[in-house]
Image (cartoon, rainbow, N blue to C red):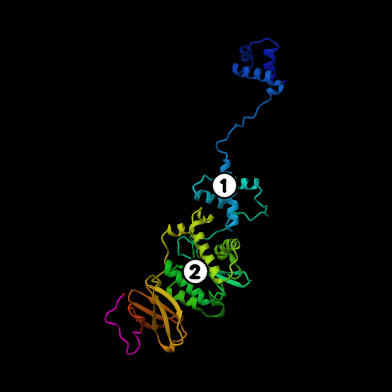
Amino acid sequence: MSKSQVIVFSVLHQGLTKTEVATKYGVTWRWVHTLVTRYQQDGLAGLEPKSRRPHTNPQQTSEVTKARIITLRTQLTSAGLDAGPASIRAWLIAEGSHSPAESTISRILTHAGLVTPTPKKRPKSSIKRFEALQPNETWQSDFTHWQLADGTDIEIINWLDDHSRLLLSLQAHPRITGEIVIDTFTENINEYGPPQSTLTDNGTVYTARFTGGRNGFEYLLSALGIRQKNGSPGHPQTQGKIERFHQTQKRWLAAQPTAQNLTQLNHQLEEFKTLYNQHRPHRALGGNTPTHAYNATIKAEPAGDSLANHYRIRTDRLDLKGKVSFRRAGKMHHLGVRAEHSRKRVLMLADETTVTVTHLETGEVLSQHVITPEKHYWPDALKPGGRWPTNQQA
């Protein structure tokens, strides 16, 4: 017989008062009264210990939040975006909603049947991560494949800032060539400033070191004082950020209507760039966007005095007559270099008054042209018989 039963029977069968029973068994009068009332209502079952669990829990996730979590899971998956607990939590915070812990979100998704069990992964604690300390400290680049609606294979080149994960640029081409690498790289420099270093794999469009020479991209980096880093052969983990980025990119593209041609695909890629840089919370950035992370810290610069710090740069190839076009302030101008340099790959360095044309691979100065905005043709001022205009206009 339990103590509760003894207390009740002492009152009901022995005729003791509740006060006497309370004193005898070292409990309060109120507790004796409570036990007697329970027995009278529910019998012996009323004397069994009851759960102390509260009827309500102010910390419990509301049904509204649960519904929003499930909706976000569906929407993000349909849009081809990451839809794990960390991503959902970042989206909730970004939209100003209360967000439970990732573990709680995981339980909600599991209970709703939205989680497919997967094999146990390598523990995150065992992964050693490397990250540039500043924006523009390292730019990663690589290209990946995609197919158009008719099955045509297309290659997409991506440039990514290592520190902020900012997608600097992306372009789709039938095939990525060394000239495309150079052109996209110089476009990024003109928009974001020069990086301190680059990190790529050992593809021939990035390096010719295994053939005993240097390609145009390597000559350009050398001319600008930018350090080149290449991953070890057969070890793609070195470029892990951009390799992982390709998964995000392809997941999003797979959720869109398949592009019919190259123009449509590039339009889709520009849409993705805006979403990725400005709206999509990035898990590795604490839920911030790449644009926020890129603008939050002072930018790194190439070691030493880089030409890219002082000039607008552009690369091109001279035509058969040794001429090249140069766009300035929305107008196209034509630069006459020299016929003997026809078809050479050149680097153009422009300041406020002058455009200097150099051979990309040797650094030799081929010509200099005074910027005269009112004229379409800018002759070579270094050519024998050439002279500098008396009224230079920036």
Say which residue appears at 60% left-offset and 56% top-offset.
78
| Quarter of the figure with residue 20 | top right
The image's mark for residue 1 is none
Is disc 2 placed on a helix, strand or loop? Answer: strand
Say which residue appears at 60% left-offset and 16% top-offset.
29
Say which residue appears at 58% left-offset and 54% top-offset.
76
Main SS, magenta region, reads loop
Please tell me which of labels 2 and 1 falls first in the chain: 1
Quarter that holds the N terminus? top right
Determine if residue 3 is in view.
Answer: no
Q: Kindly report the distance in space between the C-alpha atoms of the residues bearing marks 2 and 1.
A: 41 Å
**319 or 2, which lies in front?**
319
In the current view of this chain or complex, which residue is farthest to the left? 390
Q: Amino acid at mark 1?
A: Arg
Q: Residue 33 appears at what percent x and percent y?
A: 62, 17
Q: Residue 96 appears at what percent x and percent y?
A: 49, 47
The image's mark for residue 198 is 2
Q: Amino acid at mark 2?
A: Thr
Horizontally, is 229 left or right of 114 in the view?
left
Q: Which residue is mark 1?
A: 68
Was residue 75 drawn as part of the magenta stretch in this picture? no
Quarter that holds the C terminus? bottom left
Q: Residue 364 appears at what percent x and percent y?
A: 41, 83
| Quarter of the figure with residue 242 | bottom right
Which stretch appears magenta?
A: 380-393
